[in-house]
């Protein structure tokens, strides 16, 4: 009996030991399983945060490129503004050096320390645009958006950097999982995760190949008025057809021969179509040129006898945005210039202007493209380039007209007006080097 009792006791002890070992093994397995799950959750959270920061940086790159091509005048909150001090993002953040063609990002001083201008945007689902932004003309960007406990609020900060090549800029965008760290300049807070991307952008000129004469037409020049044709470096007129201007006042450089400044029956011009002529001047076809976001479109209404004065002034000064419509027949004596550099204007249909009217200036010329006939009356003064399907200038007694730059026509030039058409190489060069849209340079994208 004692032997049987001892045997049962030993067997119970062995069972207890095995059970304890199994329980210990299961506990270890559960611990390691839970540990692995915690690690995986942490890794997944890190991946989500990294992706969030990277996508915010990419959004900053896209946003900055879009703003560089936005002709609207903006306030400190990066929203459209008609305030007198408002400027476009390009004008407020980039300085153009006409002597070198370089673009220099603007800076500001903080306690005698030169700081680059920056723009910041914070994700805010309550906003129509989805973002709260700040792009001040001086100082650190300040966003007052409150954090949303139920939605992510990533942010990005954009800094423009100079390059050694004319027409180029380096756009650096840093993304953060929250409005903190580098995405909140001037603060000491920390963001969970940050990412940085950068890319070069280059200017695609609005005027790729400036004309070489005061008046360039594919067809004929026909005027019996005392038309002024002036050039001091190149031709006064280049025409694919005949030049009939017996009373023209021809101005040439000292020692030049006036008759040699009029070039007619130019075979190279005569063989061009209007579309080819446009693409040679602008570097792209009319559909692509007019679709650029920097181009301000103007519609003067169905009444082709109506003037387009007011609509053009509004488009140049940035008073209105998008498509402008005007059927006003009043004249204007205002001088309209854009503080944001050359203005690219596309007039859909015919254009009729009545002087006195001044468009553009030496510092801010206009590139005025008319997708139809342009009829100018009296004292209209344009500083820049006028291109139209046909150009006619008539005298209405409001004074002498003038174009400082050049006039080009896809067919003919005519009319009884006697404006002074002056070839100005400096104006055309400014249109070539400081007008147009920025595009990403292929192969220059980097992430860090």
Image: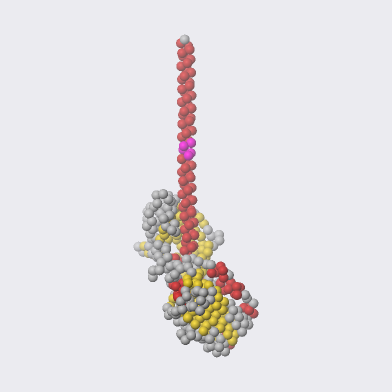
| Residue in front for this viewpoint, 168 or 221 | 221
What residue sits 46% from the left and 26% below the top? Answer: 20
Where is residue 364? Give x, y as percent.
46, 74
Where is residue 392? Give x, y as percent.
54, 81
Most distant residue in the front direction: 303
Q: Is residue 192 visible in this depiction of the protein?
A: yes
Q: Does 34 lie within the magenta span?
A: yes
| Residue in front for this viewpoint, 252 or 333 | 333
Counting the numbered discs, the total is: 0
Most distant residue in the left direction: 111
What residue sits 48% from the left and 44% below the top? Answer: 43
Q: Which residues are magenta?
A: 33-37
What residue sits 43% from the left and 78% below the top? Answer: 335
Q: Is residue 251 visible in this depiction of the protein?
A: no
Q: How is the rendered protein coloured?
A: secondary structure
What's the magenta bit mostly, secondary-structure-wise?
helix
Task: Choose top left, top right, bottom left or bottom right for residue 261.
Answer: bottom right
Q: Does 12 lie within the magenta span?
A: no
Where is residue 207? Give x, y as percent.
54, 72
| Residue in front for this viewpoint, 86 or 208 | 86
Where is residue 251? Give x, y as percent.
53, 86
What residue sits 47% from the left and 16% below the top? Answer: 8
* Left or right position of 150 against 297: left
Above or below 10: residue 218: below
Most distant residue in the bottom direction: 247
């Amino acid at each position: 009996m004692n032997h049987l009792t001892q045997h049962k006791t030993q067997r119970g002890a062995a069972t207890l030991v095995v059970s304890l070992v199994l329980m210990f093994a299961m506990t270890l397995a559960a611990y390691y399983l839970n540990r692995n799950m915690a690690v995986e959750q942490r890794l997944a959270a890190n991946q989500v945060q990294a992706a969030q920061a990277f996508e915010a940086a990419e959004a900053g790159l896209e946003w900055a490129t879009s703003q560089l091509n936005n002709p609207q005048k903006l306030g400190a909150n990066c929203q459209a503004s008609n305030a007198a001090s408002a400027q476009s993002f390009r004008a407020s953040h980039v300085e153009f050096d006409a002597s070198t063609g370089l673009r220099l990002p603007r800076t500001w001083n903080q306690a005698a320390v030169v700081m680059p201008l920056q723009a910041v945007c914070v994700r805010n689902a309550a906003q129509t645009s989805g973002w709260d932004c700040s792009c001040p003309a001086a100082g650190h960007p300040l966003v007052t958006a409150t954090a949303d406990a139920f939605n992510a609020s990533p942010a990005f900060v954009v800094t423009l950097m100079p390059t050694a090549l004319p027409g180029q800029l380096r756009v650096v965008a840093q993304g953060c999982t929250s409005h903190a760290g580098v995405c909140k300049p001037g603060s000491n807070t920390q963001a969970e995760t940050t990412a940085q991307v950068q890319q070069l952008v280059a200017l695609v000129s609005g005027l790729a190949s400036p004309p070489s004469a005061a008046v360039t037409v594919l067809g004929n020049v026909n005027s019996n008025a005392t038309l002024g044709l002036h050039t001091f470096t190149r031709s006064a007129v280049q025409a694919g057809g005949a030049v009939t201007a017996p009373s023209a006042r021809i101005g040439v450089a000292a020692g030049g021969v006036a008759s040699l400044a009029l070039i007619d029956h130019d075979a190279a011009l005569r063989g061009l179509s209007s579309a080819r002529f446009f693409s040679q001047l602008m570097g792209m076809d009319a559909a692509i040129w007019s679709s650029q976001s920097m181009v301000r479109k103007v519609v003067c209404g169905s009444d082709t006898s109506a003037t387009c004065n007011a609509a053009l002034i509004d488009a140049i000064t940035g008073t209105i945005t998008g498509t402008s419509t005007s059927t006003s027949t009043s004249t204007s004596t205002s001088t309209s210039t854009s503080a944001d550099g050359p203005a690219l204007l596309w007039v859909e249909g015919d254009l009729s202007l009545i002087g006195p009217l001044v468009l553009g200036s030496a510092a801010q010329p206009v590139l005025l493209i008319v997708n139809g006939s342009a009829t100018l009356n009296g004292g209209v003064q344009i500083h820049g380039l006028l291109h139209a399907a046909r150009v006619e200038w008539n005298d209405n007694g409001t004074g002498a007209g003038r174009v400082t730059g050049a006039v080009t026509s896809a067919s003919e030039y005519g009319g009884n007006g006697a404006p002074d058409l002056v070839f100005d190489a400096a104006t055309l060069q400014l249109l070539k080097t400081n007008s147009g849209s920025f595009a990403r340079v292929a192969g220059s994208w980097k992430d860090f």
